[in-house]
Image (spheres, grey):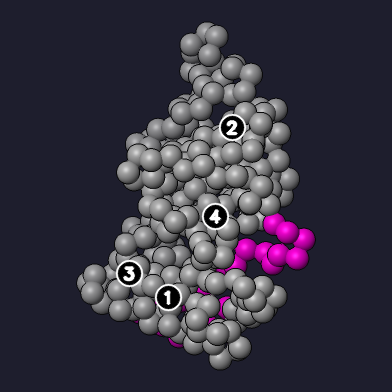
Amino acid sequence: MAVSPDGSRVYISNVINNSVTVVDAAAANIVAEINIENNPWDIGVRADNSRVYVSQYHSENVSVVDSSINIPVAKIQVGSGPAALAVKPNGERLYTASVSPPSLAAINTADNKIIKKVRLPFNGPYFMAISPEGRYLYITNDYYAVHIVDTSLLEPKAEEAPVLNPIRFDFDRAEIKQEFIKDLDNVVAFMKNHPDMKLDVGGHASFEGTDDYNNKLSMRRAKAVQKYLIDNGIAAARLSIKAFGEQMPSADNKTAEGRALNRRVEFAVAAESAR
């Protein structure tokens, strides 16, 4: 649930009906239902009330709603299931916190592009709030502790590379496809331009097959990506690999499209080099 900054509207997510209910706060009447594609979860509203952001649990997307017509007009692909979100008071940044894997992304609301994404060193996150001046994020973990993040750490330096895209794989395969070589070369360039940076490489699978098989398959995928990076000049000591199997889907495993998105390797800057 969220309240618009001017207090005129209340937005309530409805997971069962895949919608967001809009309530006129003064009259206490429902004025609209916003249809959301999949599992609406957390909600954030820009300070000028022009846009409403809705995270979609077990999806890769955040829906961007034009509040003047109460219709989604864009999607922001976060890359892993967004749960909690917060909007900077000046409206320039949207922050999304994802559970699988635990990560935090900063999004430029002018073009809906991710400008920086880092791995969080704790499980969760479940809820997030932002301070009135927009300087700090308050994020709860699965032990009900609150972590405080300085939003200035999510602003990229001038020389920083763009977000590292996931590498997708075919069903039951761990071979790197030609279409993702450019993305891997961008990772290589990023690592070479940041010699002190370490990277987490996480392999994932869709839910077909046994847990054991999917864990092994996701490890093969992570190792294939690791080998490409090492073969292209990145030291093995700078790469940490892990197999997540089917435990952390970024999209709905019930659809063919969702399963295809879940067959992936994702990157995150290691916590010890993101400080």
The residue under label 4 is 78
In the rendered image, residue 76, in percent from the top left (x then y), is placed at: 59, 51
Earlier in the chain: of badge 3 and badge 2, it is: 2
Q: State the residue position of label 3.
A: 245
- Residue 225 at what x, y percent from top left? 49, 81
Which is the main secondary structure of the residues drawn in magenta?
A: loop
Q: Is residue 126 visible?
A: no
Q: Earlier in the sequence, mark 2 or mark 4?
A: 4
In what element is the residue under mark 4?
loop
Q: What secondary structure is marked by label 2?
A: loop
Asked if residue 74 is positioned above or below residue 261 in the image, the reply reads: above
Relative horizontal placement of residue 176, taking residue 100 as reference (left or right): right
Q: Of residues 232 and 251, which is closer to you in this image?
A: 232
Q: Amino acid at mark 2?
A: Ser
Q: Amino acid at mark 3?
A: Gly
Is residue 252 placed above or below 84 in the rendered structure?
A: below
The span shown in magenta is: 156-180
Other-residue count near label 2 (Cα within 10 Å), few / some / many at <14 / 14–19 / ≥20: few
Where residue 113 sits: x, y (%)? 66, 54
Whole-number angstrom distance, CA of label 2 to CA of label 4: 23 Å
Q: Which mark is residue 241?
A: 1
User: Which residue extends farthest top?
Assistant: 27
Q: Kindly report the distance in space between the C-alpha atoms of the residues bearing marks 3 and 2.
A: 36 Å
Instruction: Give me the C-alpha separation between circle 3 and circle 1.
Output: 13 Å
Alpha carbon of mark 1 to alpha carbon of mark 4: how far? 21 Å
